[in-house]
Amino acid sequence: MNNTDKVTLREKVGYGLGDAASSMFWKLFGMYLMFFYTDIFGIDAAIVGTMFLVTRIWDSLFDPVVGVISDRTETKWGKFRPYLLWVAIPFGVLGVLTFTTPDLSVSGKIVYAYITYSLMMMIYSLINVPYASLLGVMSSDPKERTALSSYRMIFAFGGSILALLLIEPLVKFFSTQGDTVNLTFGWSMSAVVFAVIAVGFFLCTFLWTKERVRPIKETGNSLKEDVGDLFKNKPWWILLGAGIAALIFNSIRDGAAVYYFKYYATVSDTFDLGILGSALSLTTLYLVLGQGANILGILFVTPISNRIGKKKTYLFAMVFATIFSILFYFVEKDNIILMLALQILISACAGSIFPLLWSMYADIADYSEWKTGRRATGLIFSSSSMSQKFGWSIGGALTGWLLAYFGFKANVVQSAEAQEGIRMMLSFLPAIGTVLSVLFISMYPLTESKLGEITTELATKRNEKQ
């Protein structure tokens, strides 16, 4: 590794803070937004599911547009860092508006939800695609990228934990006004708190990071060339499929978790959670333990992948996630300890794959440049964001549709069929996603030895150019 490829600790922390900012809202969207729309906002679950699909598919298609634009951005701060400065405040504002409940008719609420959520996802793209692309230009060393990606994921799950720990206490605090309870005000003000934190984190990422890797070819590529290169990139297609399938797995489990503990699980009289003794607080414990286990998986993934390779590490993680997810179905409704234990195991496996995915997208950007002589980091990384949102769009839509299919009704005792459906949404149904992810990644062709050759050749060409 060249000295110019070395990334300082402050840069790694700064880079990680960017995903902590995004992940606070992403986790609230994934685990609470469906619940917010059905139980607080008052929209039917099937309508919310359709909205998730429509808005996220459109937004997924918007990601490559942002990638193309950021690839062609030239400022004194670089190509990708400026977006962290320009978009941070709009991100915070839209985050608050998404969790704001105006006094409208049902149809008015649906229109408001479509508009605010669609705009929020577009703003998310405008800041997150350049942020993700930044990984590809902070260092050209594959191992350094895996380390950066691990920092990113640790901070991402740290941001998620922060959001999950604070959201219910904040909502309760802001909702309680004397003898009255105003949940809509509580959710909106809680979003304000997270928005302020997110803006601060994004600005730290902008200030503390540096773009180092310059393309071999500085002249602008045509959009047709970039898109043509992308569509011919076999590893990109494989990773796209694997990422979408993995996100479907996570989004269905995340979206159904709140319903599982509110409408199905019961705490036995002998199981004492102390101050966390309510069913909803059990949801918090379950979700926070999952995020902590995600971090545990990330801590192990770098040494394991350095030893056996990224592909094998990904395969093993997804296979075990499938097994543990299926076992979750057989847990009795009062066996909280086993629920939490399986949540830790599943989350450790699921969390470990995300630094691998981001690192592999950076490798694919190198592969594309090595094969074509043209570099399109933003476009390639936008595809990773696209797969993330597309996976969440399918998973989120399926969550709403499945709830409606199984007969779910908000804020009432659920039928046996609805409870059975909710159980399936925490076990067998998301496991289909992990199986598909395994099938995709088994075809991934970029081995560590091949990447070593690519990195060496690109470094030689860059040195010749200087």
Image (cartoon, grey):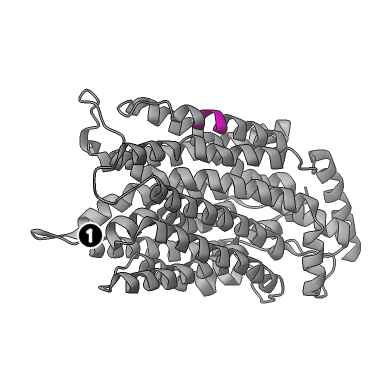
Along the line of sight, the residue nearer the viewer: 430 or 466: 430
Q: Residue furthest left?
A: 179
**Residue at 42%, 71% in the rendered image:** 116
Q: Is residue 289 left or right of residue 354?
A: left
Question: Is residue 235 visible in the rendered structure shown here?
Answer: yes
Residue 82 x/y as whole percent: 59, 72
Please state which of residues 166 and 384 is positioned toward the viewer in this rendering: 384
Tell me the quarter of the picture where residue 184 sits. Answer: bottom left
Q: Quadrant of the C terminus?
A: bottom right
* Image spot of residue 212 (x, y percent): 72, 62
- Please determine whether, in this image, residue 429 is positioned above or below residue 9: above
Q: Which residue is mark 1?
A: 183
Task: Return the residue found at the far top.
Answer: 270
The residue under label 1 is which amino acid type? Leu
Secondary structure mainly formed by the magenta segment: helix
The image shows residue 163 at horizontal and vertical percentages of: 38, 52
Q: Is residue 70 above or below residue 9?
A: below
Identify the residue at horizontal 30%, vertical 40% (top origin): 415
Give the residue at x 44% y 66%: 199
Q: Is residue 270 above or below residue 2?
A: above
In the picture, measured across the screen, residue 72 lies left or right of residue 12, that is right
Q: Which residues are magenta?
A: 321-325
256 and 347: which is toward the camera: 256
Left or right of 62, for residue 94 = left
Q: Is residue 268 magenta?
A: no
Q: Position of residue 298 (x, y in %)?
A: 56, 39
Does residue 296 appear in the picture of this structure?
no
441 left or right, relative to 424: right
**What residue appears at the point 29 percent right and 68 percent down from the top-left corner?**
101
Counting other residues with Cα less than 10 Å from the Cα at mark 1, is it few (<14), some (14-19), or many (20 or more)? Answer: some
